[in-house]
Image (cartoon, rainbow, N blue to C red):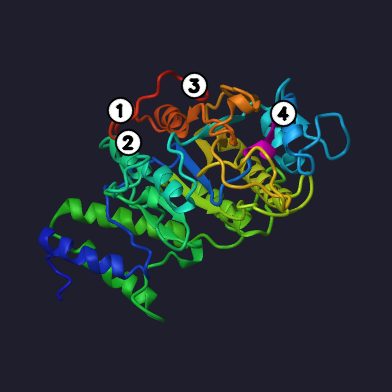
Amino acid sequence: MSTMNLSRRSFLGLSALGVASLGGVGLAFAKPPAAGAGKRKVLCVIFQRGAVDGLSMVVPWADKAYYAARPSIAIGAPGSGKDAAIKLDERFGLHPALDGLMPHWSSGKLALVHAVGSPLATRSHFDAQDYVESGTPGVKSTEDGFLNRALEAAGEREQSPVRAIGLSPNLPRILSGGAAAVAFASIQEFRVAGGKGTAPSTARSFEEMYASAVDEALRTTAASTFDAVQRISSIKPGSYPEQNGAKYPGSPLGKRLRQMSQLIQADAGVEVLVTDCGGWDTHAAQGSAKGQLATRLRDLGDSVGAFATDLKDRLDDVCVVTVTEFGRTVKENGTGGTDHGHGSVMMVLGGKTRGRKVHARWKGLAEGELFEGRDLAVTTDHRAVFGEVLRGHLGVQDLAGVFPGFSAAERLGIYG
């Protein structure tokens, strides 16, 4: 095809080719970012897949029923020894493996939400994860993810072709939909490439075709698209060295959060970043202050803590939210683990978070207060937490389309 006089119709026809030429990245063309639009607000979501035990993550140390239910895996009350929970307030303590988060708690940047989850009581990992990501518990026909709907609800402001990124091999369910979103396992995989050894020539040919377009809007859109691609592709080890003494773990999560920091600092127009971490399905040998769960929590706390430290000067513009599909049983089982439960914990860090507080409508762990006689009851819908962050951080004022059929009864006071 001639590279001259490229029409809008031809451009749209080539869009699919452009997507295929990104080596499976799936870049969608969108409106160009405004000049100087680099330091926009960024929301980062970390999905703890496998259902984390919120009762070990944020310990209800003042609740006697907690210790009665967990004779071998309970975390000791603050002050009870070197492996004790870190005191947060008169009811709750933090698992000692999460001490990497304490500087951000102390600075007022970190809030914790307990007894949070989905109103739908499924114990299926697949269904529960799907409902969290779709934002429509119990409705399996929902095709798009709630974060994608949130981006669309944010309005027709200047957009970026890499407005939403999933740090994962495939596009996360939560980002699927009509708004521009891409996915790649690492920054190094993000490149314009028509096949092995053809990346430079393919990139040049597309740039030449789009540059010769008759339609000025197409030229502008194409130019911003390639600018975003080049900004991300130019990120190499050492491009954005860790700041403020931040030290990321060498784990997959640590590496992905390091790359999230780089993407934010590259100012390519990223607005939403999503990744996940697994290993939370602790049916056996869960451990207490040490062991399987503690190892996973150490990785989470050190990774998120390093990310916040690294972005210290920009953390007012960045908000991190963690979520899991459900919690785990109050009582430990016969193999020193916990089974699929209901309520769990979310973390909110950065931006205008009203931190240094455990937000909880706490019913307690007495048998009469448990959900179905076995689980921590959900008293805060996870959509209410996300709703406050979306409204306060990304400016999404109308949440009716983001979470259809849901309306939070009251503001939680977590953000804004």
Residue extending farthest to the right is 81
Q: Nearer the viewer, mark 4 or mark 3?
A: 4
Q: What x and y, as percent, mark residue 62?
A: 74, 24
Along the polypeptide, which appears first: circle 1 or circle 4?
A: 4
Earlier along the polypeptide chain: callout 4 or callout 3? 4
Viewer-nearest of discs 1 and 3 = 3
- Compare marks 4 and 2 and give the one earlier in the sequence: 4
Where on the picture, by quarter, is residue 8?
Answer: bottom left
Q: Where the N terminus falls, by quadrant?
A: bottom left
Determine which of the numbered discs, if any, sits on residue 65 in the image.
4
Marks 2,1: beta carbons within 8 A: yes
- CA–CA distance between discs 2 and 1? 8 Å
User: What is the distance, in whole Å, between disc 3 and disc 2 at their CAs?
Assistant: 18 Å
Disc 1 versus disc 3: distance between alpha carbons? 17 Å
Q: At numbered mark 2, what does the secondary structure look like: helix, strand or loop?
A: loop
Find residue 269 and report its horizontal and vertical position in percent: 40, 46
Tell me how far mark 4 sits from mark 2, CA to CA: 38 Å
Mark number, residue 398: 1
Q: Is residue 267 visible?
A: no
Please check the rendered image and state whether residue 58 is part of the magenta-colored stretch, yes or no: yes
Q: Which residue is mark 3?
A: 412
The amino acid type found where label 1 is placed reads Asp
Q: Which amino acid type is marked by label 3?
A: Leu
User: Which of the 4 image quadrants contains residue 67?
Assistant: top right
At x 41% / y 67%, what residue is drawn?
A: 191
Say what amino acid the circle numbered 4 marks.
Ala
Quickly name the residue at label 2. Answer: 402
Question: What range is drawn magenta here?
Answer: 54-60
Q: CA distance from mark 4 to mark 3?
A: 26 Å
Question: Label 2: how many residues lie within 10 Å, few (<14), some (14-19) or many (20+)?
Answer: many
